Amino acid sequence: MNTPLIRLMQLASPALPVGAYTYSQGMEWAVEQGWIRDEATALAWVEGILRHPLAGFEAPMLAALQRAANGCDTDRFRELNDWFIASRETGELRAETVQMGYSLFRLALALGEEDFVADEESLSFPAVWALLASRWQIDESASVGGYLWSWSENQVMAAIKLVPLGQTAGQRLLWRLGGLIPDLARAAIILEEPLWNGYAPGVALASSGHETQYCRLFRS
């Protein structure tokens, strides 16, 4: 086992103090509407997002951000970061990525990465992840796979609380989702930019509904 793999495990850990567990990305509203009501519908929801907006836009964006960081291409890195933030369809999705990006940036400083040269006030979460993956020499494919796994794990944890589901059901979901990630990560890192597609109207509707949901557990 090498150090970059250990660093990736730290980045992907649910113990990473960036507040990911406080967000459901619209799942809470989808549960209230009855779109998600059991293990099968939870899997359909999470897998659909993983396969399409995550693997089709966020993952190739992350890979491109890491390449820009590797090449010290500040203009390209900033362009991609701004594009990602602008792509967030609702106020809560935008606030989520900026807050998590800021928290990860501050954590990086606390871990000794004092020479970060970036504006932490406007960095998205995938942008800071890409910076750290580059600095810690994490393989691009592994970085993308770890990112997709981390997102999947947080969504399953939200489903366990909201549906609710048992721990064994949660592990079945992770088993299924984890089996998809290697192929999705490999495809994402070679996906050409004109083919990137984050279109997910159901997620946008769920997130916008969650912003005004009367009673909610997750952050808006």
Image (cartoon, rainbow, N blue to C red):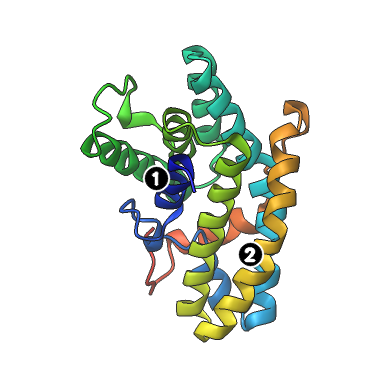
Q: Quadrant of residue 195?
A: top right
What amino acid is found at the position of numbered circle 1 in the picture? Answer: Ala
Circles 1 and 2, Cβ within 8 Å, touching? The answer is no
List the residue tagged with mark 1: 95
Q: Position of residue 116 (x, y in %)?
A: 31, 23
Q: Is residue 97 left or right of residue 168?
A: left
Graded by Cα atoms within 10 Å as few (under 14), some (14 to 19) or many (20 or more), the crowding at tag 2 reads many
Residue with the mark numbered 2: 46
Q: Earlier in the sequence, mark 1 or mark 2?
A: 2
Dot 1 alpha-carbon crowd within 10 angstroms: few under 14, some 14 to 19, many 20 or more? some
Q: Nearer the viewer, residue 214 or 180?
A: 180
SS at mark 1 in the image: helix
Q: Is residue 119 above or below residue 196?
A: above
Q: Looking at the image, which residue sits at the far front?
A: 1
Query: Does residue 215 show up?
Result: yes
Q: Which one is closest to the eye, mark 1 or mark 2?
A: 2
